[in-house]
Amino acid sequence: MTYRRERHSAEEAVSAVQSGMRVFIGSGAAAPIDLIEAFCARALSLHDVEACQIITLGGAPYTAREFSGHVRHNAFFIGSNARVAIHEGRADFTPVFLSEVASLLRGPLPVDVALVQVSPPDDHGYCSLGVSVDVVKPAVDAAKIVIAEVNPKMPRTYGDAFIHCSRITRFVDVDHPLPELPSEAITETLRGIGRNVASLVRDGDTLQLGIGGIPNAVLDELHNHRDLGIHTEMFSDGVIDLVKRGIITNARKTLHCGKLVASFVMGSRRLYDFVHDNPGLEMHPSHYVNDPFTIAKNRGMVAINSALAVDLTGQVCADSLGSRFYSGVGGQVDFIRGAARAEDGRPIIALPSTAYDGQVSRIDVELSPGSGVTTSRNDVHFVVTEFGIASLYGKTIRERVHALVAIAHPDFRERLLAGARERRWIW
């Protein structure tokens, strides 16, 4: 069986999907666009198909109302393209640590068909999963049927990123650019957060940071640091310049010394060109990268995660707006706990002090009703806003209240103190 003999059209390939099956869809910028379109064209002739995934770039047409009863979406992390369907009750959300998605796919949620995107095979028959290894690798390993778009524009990445042609049931040749994720602008608020977070970073540290305004702002404040390393579930364009300037060298890492380590990347064409055929980058599945025991092997591990809200006892909500599910736990708890257990590790929660143009304080007396606790008060060490750093680890509730009020927006501090007094947390 060879790649050349097994080529199919997208329509022919997805004919393998039958009613009652669970279909896994590839992640992030590696979402298989042509296969998704063909799958949706077939879906109305099927019933009770489950489409599961973490976040993807681009559309998620299988979440449309017309597919109710035919396809039901199941998100392990809620992206913007699935949020409406979940809010309307037409799709499902499965809360799970990113490090444990592989266990679901190998156990209680077995995969019938995996729709993925790969690079062309090399002379030995190996295709790379490219920019998204995350939970795609375990899905491919577990699936009964693997259908792959083979795209020459998919970067070839190293690490545990390869699957052999013999593991792929049907190949579909495509040639389209990967979807890009625009960089978020750095506002003055984000710049203040970036400066405060950067003050907790020391030369030689290993960083976990994600995608968005806060990671961009942190990276922008690290230009005077030396020999930083990366061990992160994902990264974007901001890392490139620090690598090229010799600030990120990975030379002092205690795990995978000399290597950037990640499980997926999303960003611009420049980022995809950077990771292509780059021996300085290793891509590994999320059950390895996000394993707290793996993370803890990085001395000086600094985990930087964002939140929607924090209460005055230190509880963190990052996945819901009240009772409305917004995203998911992702890798936050994995990295908070891993960094806490690392030698000289520093787990950080970073967030703007307000939301809705300054009308709402993100630091509040209590989380709003229905909000989930993503990271417990017992796990939180540092909380950072543009107004400063609150060190909470080992602190009493009384001490936590004062530390968090001090980094809240000044317009809300008196109300926060009054709420804490009412609850007898402070005098």
Image (tube, rainbow, N blue to C red):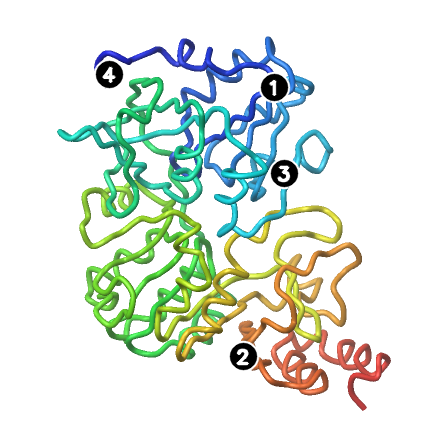
* Disc 3/disc 1 C-alpha distance (Å): 24 Å
Classify the position of the C terminus by image quarter: bottom right
Q: Residue 42 location in percent, x, y?
A: 53, 11
Q: Is residue 312 depicted above or below 356 in this figure?
A: below
**Dot in front, 4 or 3:** 4
Disc 3 secondary structure class: helix
Disc 2 secondary structure class: strand
Q: Is residue 46 depicted above or below 203 in this figure?
A: above
Residue for badge 2 = 388
Which of pointers 4 and 2 lies earlier in the amino acid sequence? 4
Disc 4 secondary structure class: loop
Which of pointers 1 and 4 lies earlier in the amino acid sequence? 4
Residue for badge 3 = 83
Farthest right residue in view: 422
Q: Residue 27 location in percent, x, y?
A: 44, 37
Which residue type carries mark 3?
Arg
Along the line of sight, which residue is nearer the eye, 11 or 219?
11
Kindly identify which numbered label has been placed on residue 1. Answer: 4
Q: Residue 130 location in percent, x, y?
A: 30, 39
Crowd class of label 3 (few under 14; some 14 to 19; many from 20; radius 10 Å): many
Classify the position of the N terminus by image quarter: top left
* Disc 2/disc 1 C-alpha distance (Å): 52 Å
Q: Residue 367 location in percent, x, y?
A: 74, 64
Disc 1 secondary structure class: loop
Kindly identify which numbered label has been placed on residue 20. Answer: 1
Which of pointers 4 and 3 lies earlier in the amino acid sequence? 4
The residue at the point 40 percent across, 9 percent down is: 12
